[in-house]
Image (spheres, rainbow, N blue to C red):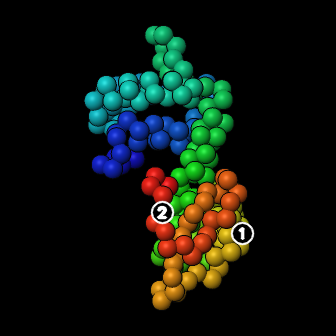
Amino acid sequence: MKLSDSRPIFTQIMAWVEDNILRGDWQPGYQLPSVREMSGRFTVNNNTIVRTYEHLTLSGTIYSQRGVGYFVSPDARESILSRRREEFYSDILPYFINQIEVLGISPDEISSIIKRNVKKMKRSTIAGLTAAVILIIVPAVFMSLNIARLPRPEQRPLRLCGWLSRGKSMWSRSSAPMPAGR
């Protein structure tokens, strides 16, 4: 894994640990690499790994056995999935939909991009399921939001004015600015 500058290092390492759990590489009860091993792997200070493990422990993803090490919690996968799905629905999906609108992207464009990227994915059951879900969900999002016909640049743009989870109408031709923080 290559670390980037866009997020704190410990959160990137946390995501890497969680990804290993979600992929099934690290099952419940699996002993995580030692702090020294992890700091060597990512070429970071030991304190960064300690901070990562502390956050994962507080979230219930891992637990420690004094003098032995850190282990994957029995319900780690479910709690990670639950948290990440909530983040996806509250943060990523509304942003995704807004970008579709702003950029004037058609459903056909998205489908072709997804199909192209699916070919690059690993040929595994998880990749196959992910691809199938994406190919089903994206058109469903377009249909449910009735945005198959996005406005052309000369038309007044649609504005996002509600959230998916509230079930309110999401689109209007209002010229009012978007509320801050949405």
Say which residue appears at 47% left-offset and 86% top-offset.
153
Res 131 → quadrant: bottom right
**Residue drawn at 48 percent across, 10 percent down:** 66
Instruction: Point out the frontmost of discs 2 and 1.
Output: 2
Identify which amino acid the numbered label 1 is placed on: Ser
Which label is found at residue 144? Answer: 1
Q: Residue furthest top?
A: 67
Q: Establish if 11 lies above or below 130.
A: above
Residue 17 in sight here: yes
Relative depth, front residue between 96 and 119: 96
SS type, badge 1? helix
Measuring from the top left, give residue 87's x and y in whole percent. Answer: 56, 47
| Residue 16 numbered mark, or none | none
The crowding category of the residue bearing disc 2, from other C-alpha atoms within 10 Å (few below 14, some 14 to 19, many at least 20), is few
* Secondary structure at numbered mark 2: loop
Taking the image as shown, residue 162 lies to the left or right of residue 42, namely right
Reply above or below: 64 against 51.
above
- Asked if disc 2 and disc 1 are in contact, CB closer than 8 Å, the reply is no
Task: Tell me if residue 170 comes above or below residue 27 in the rendering.
Answer: below
Count of numbered badges drawn on the protein: 2
Q: Is residue 101 visible?
A: no
Q: Amino acid at mark 2?
A: Met
Quadrant of res 77: top right
Which residue is the site of mark 2? 178
- Residue 83, image x and y in percent? 59, 40
Please tell me which of labels 2 and 1 falls first in the chain: 1
Q: CA distance from mark 2 to mark 1?
A: 22 Å
